């Protein structure tokens, strides 16, 4: 069997939205924290297929969705033709007029190799007093998943993969926000075990969906055995009678531009 290995910026937008709709579903409390007001101008950074962009728009705000993946933006434009979406990079996006808020759900950990550049772009996009409201993976996120992945790679004689995500501790990210010109008003750090309802093949399906880029360069004849081993190693921690559960840890914050 051949496995596609999309990079994070070339995700399959269709399966992201259907199988992994929980990414958007879990964003509802974050929209409440954002508390969008009619007429406010808001950026949805890492908007994916635009589900939360549309939800925030339904509260009366004018929202610009930005995502690094052109496939996601194409799907967002097709689903929500009246809304504004552009392809952009969190590390260096610019806007013509400052916004009242920047919102970001489950996306900052994909942009984290240069977290200060992201924070700086967000600051520049905001009016003074503007809000940065976001949720991302925090330290320890997916620990069992990634440990299983690294062990399986090693056992197959492969170099341990360089994981593409950034999962900071609350203290580290708060320090970056403060140094980057924000006042942190709320910071929460919590476990959020997440059912992988649409992953009948558990951790292996999760790897294909979210870590497909790591399979690039793996000899095709090793892939099935590698993913089978990921499942065996992850199962004791993540497999329940009711199905697989991802060990997600969230970092949720609201900060205000000084
Ligand atoms: C997350 O939402 O925590 C996540 C999703 C995919 C890959 C890594 C982390």
Image (cartoon, rainbow, N blue to C red):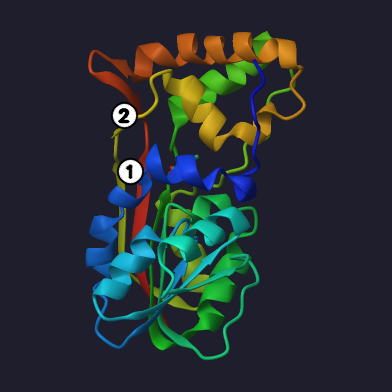
State the residue position of label 1: 22
Quarter of the image for the C terminus: give it: bottom left
Q: Which of marks 1 and 2 is nearer the N terminus?
A: 1
Q: For the point 31% across and 81% down, which residue is it?
A: 61
State the residue position of label 2: 197
Q: Residues within 10 Å of mark 2 (few under 14, many from 20)?
A: some
**Where is residue 19 drawn, in percent x and y?**
39, 37
**Where is residue 22 drawn, in percent x and y?**
33, 43
Q: For the point 53% across and 37% down, which residue is it?
A: 210
Is disc 1 placed on a helix, strand or loop?
helix
Q: Please say if 31 is above or below 19.
A: below
Q: For the point 58% across and 60% down, which residue is it?
A: 115
Do labels 1 and 2 touch, CB within 8 Å?
yes
Occupied quadrant, residue 40: bottom left
Q: Please say if 190 is above or below 108.
A: above
Q: Please say if 249 is above or below 119.
A: above
Judge from the rendering whether residue 194 lies leftward or rightward of residue 97; answer left or right: left
- In this rendered view, identify the residue nearer to me: 17 or 155: 17
Q: Is mark 2 within 8 Å of ligand 1?
A: no
Occupied quadrant, residue 222: top right
Occupied quadrant, residue 157: top right
Please say whether residue 69 is visible from this viewpoint: no
Is disc 2 placed on a helix, strand or loop?
loop
- In this rendered view, identify the residue nearer to me: 186 or 211: 211
Q: Please say if 63 is above or below 150.
A: below
Q: For the point 38% across and 20% down, which residue is it?
A: 200
How far apart are the two marked residues, 1 and 2, measured between alpha carbons?
A: 9 Å
**Where is residue 106 drawn, in percent x and y?**
43, 52
């Amino acid at each position: 069997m051949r496995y596609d290995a999309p990079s994070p910026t070339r995700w399959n937008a269709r399966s992201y939205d259907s199988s992994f709709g929980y990414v958007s579903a879990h964003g509802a409390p974050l929209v409440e924290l954002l508390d969008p007001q009619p007429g406010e101008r808001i950026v949805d950074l890492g908007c994916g297929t635009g589900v939360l962009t549309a939800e925030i728009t339904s509260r009366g705000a004018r929202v610009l969705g930005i995502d690094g993946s052109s496939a996601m933006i194409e799907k967002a434009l097709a689903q929500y033709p009246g809304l504004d979406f552009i392809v952009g990079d969190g590390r260096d996006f610019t806007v013509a007029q400052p916004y009242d808020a920047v919102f970001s759900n489950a996306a900052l950990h994909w942009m984290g190799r240069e977290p200060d550049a992201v924070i700086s772009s967000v600051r520049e996009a905001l009016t003074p007093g503007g809000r940065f409201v976001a949720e991302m993976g925090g330290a320890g996120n997916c620990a069992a998943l990634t440990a299983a992945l690294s062990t399986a790679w090693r056992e197959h004689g492969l170099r341990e993969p360089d994981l593409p995500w950034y999962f900071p501790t609350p203290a580290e990210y708060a320090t970056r926000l403060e140094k980057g010109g924000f006042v942190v008003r709320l910071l929460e750090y919590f476990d959020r075990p997440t059912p992988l309802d649409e992953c009948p093949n558990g951790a292996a399906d999760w790897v294909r969906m979210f870590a497909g880029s790591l399979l690039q360069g793996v000899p095709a004849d090793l892939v099935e055995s590698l993913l089978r081993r990921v499942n065996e190693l992850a199962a004791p921690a993540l497999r329940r009678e009711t199905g697989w559960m991802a060990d997600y840890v969230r970092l949720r914050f609201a900060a205000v531009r000084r």
